[in-house]
Image (tube, rainbow, N blue to C red):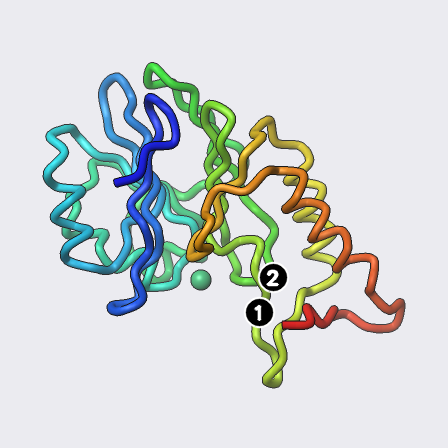
Amino acid sequence: MIKLSERISYIKATESPLSADVGLIFGDRSLWLYDVGNNTEVTREILSIDMPKNAVLSHFHPDHTGGLLSVGAERVYLSAYTKKYVGLGETVIGDVYVSDGVKLHIFPLPSSHSKGALGLEAEGFAFLGDGTYTEKKGGRYVYNATLLKDMITRLKSLEATTFLLSHDPRYALPREEVILNLEKIYSRRKKEEAYIDAGE
Ligand SMILES: [Zn+2]
């Protein structure tokens, strides 16, 4: 477990089995998980924390959601699209604010990577999951230009100064760096094309 602040930590992603980073926010009453990973060792580490748990799921991919039933979350927040895969939880449509000693802000994130992405910000940190990543289309990594523009607008509206990107070896990146990088990609869009090559 890696500590980012007094109340915020994360458990690193693993590659085999493929399991996304798990964000941990220690509220007064509950432990808030941003994604649950898909690795029994990660699940064990989560269960070793003796607090009631709530979970926010970033998107439907199994490396982010696979451990859900094992962590025993009391409440699960997810998008309608993720719910189609996961089968349970409370659907988040707009911004949701929760107070648990710490102020949590759950928000829909327009994303090329997947439909129904959710972010979570608290105390200057924004968990974004895979939301800022590309989708693979015809063997190429691309951004949907409209979604990328909407995502940049959304990211700029956040209060957080540090963005947390799943699977990234650095994980915690300065907000400006992430936005600048996405704006650079957006500036390469061609008017007649719906997709932008990410050059990966
Ligand atoms: Zn994903």
Pick whichever, 172 or 46, lies toward us.
Answer: 172
Disc 1 crowd rating (10 Å Cα; few below 14, some 14-19, many 20+) is some
Ligand 1 has an atom within 8 Å of the beta carbon of the residue at disc 1: no
Tag of residue 62: none
The kind of residue on which mark 2 rests is Ser
Specify which label sits upstream in the sequence, 2 or 1.
2
Q: Residue at x 15, y 55 (%)?
A: 41
Say left or right for 191 vs 47: right
What residue sits 26% from the left and 17% below the top?
28
Return the residue found at the far right.
191
* Position of residue 162 measured from the top left corner of the image (x, y, whole percent): 54, 34
Label 2 and label 1: CA atoms lie apart by 6 Å
In the picture of the structure, the residue carrying the numbered disc 1 is 135
Query: At numbered mark 1, what does the secondary structure look like: helix, strand or loop?
Result: strand
Mark 2 lies on residue? 112
Looking at this view, is 160 or 6 the one in front? 6
Q: Which quarter of the frame holds ligand 1?
A: bottom left
Query: In the rendered view, would you say 158 is above or below 80?
Result: above
Residue 27 position (above or below residue 197): above
Circles 2, 1 touching at the beta carbon (< 8 Å): yes
Quadrant location of the C terminus in the rendered image: bottom right
Classify 107 as above or below 113.
above
